[in-house]
Amino acid sequence: MDVVVENFHLYYTGFLKTLGICLWAAAGSVLLGTSLAALRVSPVQSLQWMSAGYVNALRNCPLTVVLFFVAFGLPELGLNCSYYWFAVSALVLYTAAFICEAARSGINSVPQGQAEAARSIGMSFSRSLRLVILPQALRSVVPPLGSVIIAMIKNSAIVGAFGVGGELFSVGDTLTGSRGYAALPVLSGVLIGYLLITVSAGLLIQILERKATIAR
Amino acid sequence: MSNLLFDTPGRRARRRVLIASALSVVGLAALVYMTVRRLANQGQLGAEKWSPVFNPADEQFALLWRFLAVGLLNTLRAASVAVVLSVALGTALAVARISAARSYGWLIVTAVEILRGVPVVIAIFFAARVLPELGLELPLMWYLVIGLTVYNSVVIGEIVRAGVGALPRGQTEAAEALGLSRGQTLGLVLLPQAFRIMLPALISQLVVVLKDTSLGAFISYEELLRRGNIAVQSLQNPLQLFLVIALLFIAVNYALGQLAARVERRVSQSAAFQD
């Protein structure tokens, strides 16, 4: 494991960069995903179809292909930015589809009677949504949302394989590839970095889950 | 579920919905128009960009599609081998976890939990970089298959365990009352029933595996994406080619997803019939 100790600063900066990518991507995909879910449950049929089309397309397309499309295709359209932001946006586009599904299942898990009761005591649409349905839906959405986010953290390694320099996985890639270190210790170090993030994210979500669950 | 959030719309609400749909369609059309104009401005609508991919009369059309077809075939081959191996290994893992004694059961649990947290790319790179160091030279496909199998067998193992756990307790009790051993109970009574319940979940996992085979591109296994990337280098039309590759993946996976949904309906129907 000397390699890991010798190149600790590389690992450390890589770890921070991965963490940054994950945070940006998590924020972006939750934002985009919940708006997609809102479209999906809206009364406007055409919006429902657009959202469903987006989700079906992105869910069935490998992240790698999305990444290639964004990073090699968009420059052809004259849209240029750094690989870092291409990578983040690909992660956001892809993960949002899964977030949308998780959020939708959360809204669907609220018993029908709740909405009916809210309406029958005379609550308006926005009040029943704000005071009755969303608070319950948000609670039941925590576990599936958590597993989507954890999957996204793992997927962020793909971004490194793709060539966002200095990211945790790409650190391992350069150390084993061009610098010729033995692969086993180098990749184990990378793996520990990812496990650190995923395991702590898992614990965080568990705490949230315990806080959020309500007895039904 | 459509009326969970709102009442059946009345006259005014219907009119508002109609206006909103019209606005959204106009918005989408504007977006499409802007994209097309942008494409035209950047010279992306030229025939030389599209015709090798979509025009059968183009001289490169047959060549390109034969090239991509082999890629798709490689993708499907790697995915199916990985799935078969993962189901076999996953079942073994589930059986081990179910029947393990307390004393070493935690070992399996820990291994499963760690492997579940491993990014698939890293599993594949582990296989591709570490195995040759250990003196195990394999064709590229097998590194991909091994990486995919290590990750997915754990996931499938959990699916199998959940399937067995979901069976009514009476099944085990009846098998034990008949004098079947623990192995026979699992093999003859529980697993066959569990597999039937899990079939939809297994097919969905096949979609995941199929998507993950595209990671083979990073270890230069010539699956669909890699081949597409090679073709881009000579045709210089990344937008068009990656679009086609995305559509191919979406078509195959969407079909699999529909199959999973259909199987799920069948399974739940026949289960309802039995009870």
Image: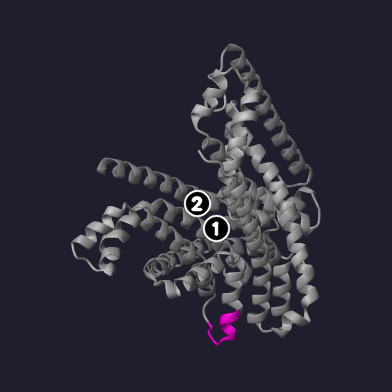
| Residues tagged 1 and 2 counted as in contact (Cβ below 8 A) | yes
* Amino acid at circle 1: Lys
Residue A150 screen position, x and y as percent: 62, 57
- Which of the colour schemes (rainbow, by chain, secondary structure, one colour) is used? one colour
**Residue at image point 34% right, 56% down:** B194
SS under mark 2: helix
- Chain of the residue under the numbered disc 2 shown in the image: B
Circle 1 sits on which residue? Answer: B211
SS under mark 1: helix
Near-viewer residue (A94 or B267): B267
Q: Is residue B55 left or right of residue A167?
A: left
Residue B106 appears in the figure? yes
Residue sitting at the far left: B178
Q: Is residue B146 left or right of residue A202?
A: left
Q: Are marks 1 and 2 on the same chain?
A: yes
Residue neighbourhood size for the residue with mark 2, other residues' Cα within 10 Å, grouped as few (<14), some (14–19), many (≥20): many
Q: Is residue B41 left or right of residue B223?
A: right
Near-viewer residue (B274 or B238): B274
Residue B128 screen position, x and y as percent: 58, 76
The residues tagged by marks 1 and 2 sit, at their Cα atoms, a distance apart of 8 Å
Circle 2 sits on which residue? Answer: B253
* Amino acid at circle 2: Asn
Tell me if residue B55 is in the magenta stretch: no
* B74 up-or-down from A172: above or below: above
The magenta span reads B130-137
* B196 up-or-down from A123: above or below: below
- Chain of the residue under the numbered disc 1 shown in the image: B
Residue sitting at the far front: A215
Q: Which mark is residue B12?
A: none
**Residue at image point 74% right, 67% down:** A15
Residue A145 appears in the figure? no
Residue A146 screen position, x and y as percent: 61, 51
